[in-house]
Image: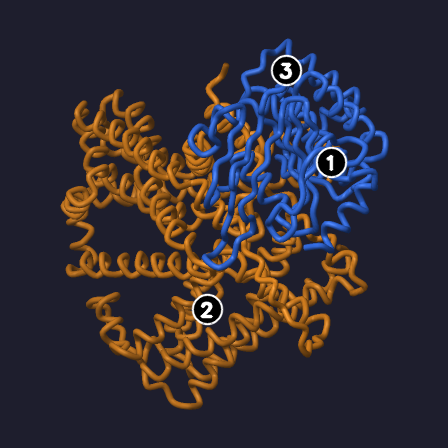
Amino acid sequence: MSEKQILEIRHYSKAYSEDKKAVDDVSLSVMSGDIYGFIGHNGAGKSTTIRAVVGVLDFTDGEIFIDGHSVRKEPMACKRVTAYIPDNPDLYENLTGIQYLNFVADIFGISAAQREQSIKKYADLFEITGDLGDLISAYSHGMKQKLAIISALIHDPRLLVLDEPFVGLDPKATFTLKEIMRDMCSRGTAIFFSTHVLDVAEKLCNKVAIIKHGRIIASGTMEELTEGHSLEETFLEADNDE
Amino acid sequence: MMNNGFVLLKTLLLSTSLWNIFRHSKDKKKRRRVVGNAIGSFVVYVMLVGLCIAMGIGFGRLGLIQAVPTMCALVISLMAFVFTLFKTNGYLFGFKEYDMLMSLPLESRTVAGCKFLYMYVRSLPWYLSLSLAMLISYGVHARPGAAVYPLWLVLSLLLPVIPMLGAAFVGFLIARVSAGHRKNNVLQTVLMMVFVIFCFSLRFIIEGVFRDDRIPEVLQKAFQLGDSAGRYYLPVSWFTAAVTKLSLSDMLLLAGVSILLFGVVFAIVGRSYRRINSALKSHAAARSFRMSAQRQRGAVSAIAYKEFKRMTGSTQYMVNCGVGHILAVLVGLIALVIGPDKIIHTVMQEAPINAAMLRPAIPFIAYFLVGMLATTACSPSLEGKNYWILQSLPIEKRTVFQGKMLFNLALSVPFMTLSILFMCIASKAAALDTALYVLLGLALCGFSTAWGCVCGIRHMRLDWENDIEVIKQGAAVTIYMLPNMVVAIGLMVVSVILGMRVDARLTTLGFTLIALLLAALCYRWVMKLASKR
């Protein structure tokens, strides 16, 4: 499969005040088939970058392109091919799981037959099919996370953006999500996700960027970056050097 | 594909629908609460319709039935404007599912427009109840043609749109101005408060103008006054002309302008919607903290301090609970500056009342404003999903509610005292009377705090989507606020009448004892309820 640039971040900066930049001059690109890990300390700027990519957060400088479309100028074209899973999804608590999934499917214009197939497939994989008729308010944190993941997958996105996706998931669901990510990657989907779990990033990602105090301090393919060391060692070394 | 705006609106309505919760919840307690809420809303709805029918019949008996369509349009427009102003900030900006919605392929103006329409649909039954009641009385007395009935109802659907859009646009402007500032939340609260107080004062100015004539004459001139109101606010005259003269051009004007204005407002709002929300939802971390000497607080004080931070962190909370306090002090200051006799003359006109006769009512006037909304009525529900924090702490539940009550007292006591002192100085009350009024004011603060807490605990609701649902529309707040305001007005009248017949000091002392007794009873009730939570 030929590689195509799906996500391109060019000199992206986000300032909350004139003297304070949350993210400073971040550039990176994610190709189709990439699983790109975005790692850094708490408050390093990972979520700020991710929220700008998915069109939720306004930004100061730079440009972000998804599948060739500018997030700033053509947000709808970008959102149609993107799926986002936040770290702590705020879902409509008084809807049932299936009502929520139907809402997302309606927004993406997914046909009844296609949504039925997708929902069944992913709900079975995450073992929550039986719970879809219950109110979301009755779900545990992990179940809400699974529901958010299913809602992100039902429109078969070209770019999947995840913020700390493994937080709150049980070991089996973590395994299932990793398998789904690998499968999507093999079908040409680009995946960009933040994580603190370096072991997972090391095993799953082919590319990694390390962000510290809003600036990228290291990035590249996993092999280039680690040079035979573990990702943990690489991360700590890069962190200390800065 | 269904229209995305329609899908979103339908989902927003479904996500707060009592019927959906009742149908799908397995929790019996939750289902019972849903039924209770539905019955409570229905009772209030019937009461409102009854009150409006009675008002309409009153107009009919006074031979002023022709003024009813104008009155109907005016009242609905005013209510829609004021209520939307208090809610718009919470609904349009900084709502918690913002990230989820904005990451979907929905235009910013669609999200903002749907949030507005959601607000409109949710409040529509209340405006329609008013309109329906006035239509009934108009039908009975004026006996209009058959076409008037459906026309009246259809146009009533449009009546709240323009004032709601006006209020939403004011909220948008305030949010936009605040968004560029570091302390945007504080600035937003201050601007909203200033605008609300301006609206209240505008109401009094208009009332003053209306009361240039004596009351019966004003009623006789209601038709002309309505006409003049229609000259300044055109939708009122469009509605009146459409239902009384069956004027097609006025119908089209009302419908056309409402739709056009909706399009224009949300085209403007949509353009800076993401920027405003980004600014309101994201905050820079200063990372400049240096460890210094920390202060230890007792558990009750710590909870009270937490309540203080919760309140100052939410514009909706500050505006809704704080406006009465600010108004109370403002009324006192105005009395001090321009003198109580001028105020009485403006408000009461020729009524045989002077400042001395009104003195016994001073604590109740202050209480009407300060006690308008006790923070304790909504603070238990405001815990929301964070209730676990308090539940997991090694403290008794009574401590939690004592902390919440302490905060309300810390907030209401200074405002109550200042307001009463200003009014007493302005009305030249004796030192002993002033002390007694302040004492009564403090007892009333105690009562409102404890009674608010009873309502807050009994009707605690943690599963809200937007905090405005519990601050403005929650069962606890409604049950606390409505009777409390009616009783406060009643007590103002009773205190004046008793003050003329019995020793005013004795009456004040009697009221103080009753208020203290009620406060103590409510406090015991709170402790009892707390032990069950």
Provide the chain ID for the residue under circle 1. A
Chain corresponding to blue in the figure: A
Label 1 CA crowd tier, 10 Å (few <14, some 14–19, many 20+): few
Letter of the orange chain: B
Viewer-nearest residue: B290 or B503: B290
Q: Looking at the picture, how far across and down is residue B9, in whole percent?
A: 49, 29
Find numbered disc 1 in the image and state the secondary structure of the residue it sits on.
Answer: helix
Judge the density around disc 3: few (<14), some (14-19), many (≥20) Cα neighbours within 10 Å: few
Q: Which amino acid type is marked by label 2?
A: Tyr
3D distance between C-alphas at marks 1 and 2:
72 Å
From the image, state whether disc 3 or disc 2 is nearer to you.
Answer: 3
Dot 2 falls on a residue whose secondary structure is helix
Question: Which of the colour schemes (rainbow, by chain, secondary structure, one colour) is used?
Answer: by chain
Closest to the observer, B497 or B35: B35
- Which label belongs to residue A2? 3
Q: Which residue is mark 1?
A: A224
Image quarter for residue B298? Answer: bottom right
Q: Residues within 10 Å of mark 2 (few under 14, many from 20)?
A: many
- Which quadrant holds the C terminus of chain B? bottom right
Amino acid at pointer 1: Glu
Residue B365, relative to residue B215: is it above or below?
A: below
State the mark number for residue B367.
2
Which of the two discs, 1 and 3, labels the residue nearer the N terminus?
A: 3
How far from the left and from the top, in percent, is residue A237? 76, 51
Decide if residue B230 is in sight here: yes
From the viewer's perspective, is residue B146 above or below residue B363? above
Q: Residue at x 62, y 56 (%)?
A: B456
Residue B337 is situated, as x and y percent measured from the top left of the image, at 27, 78
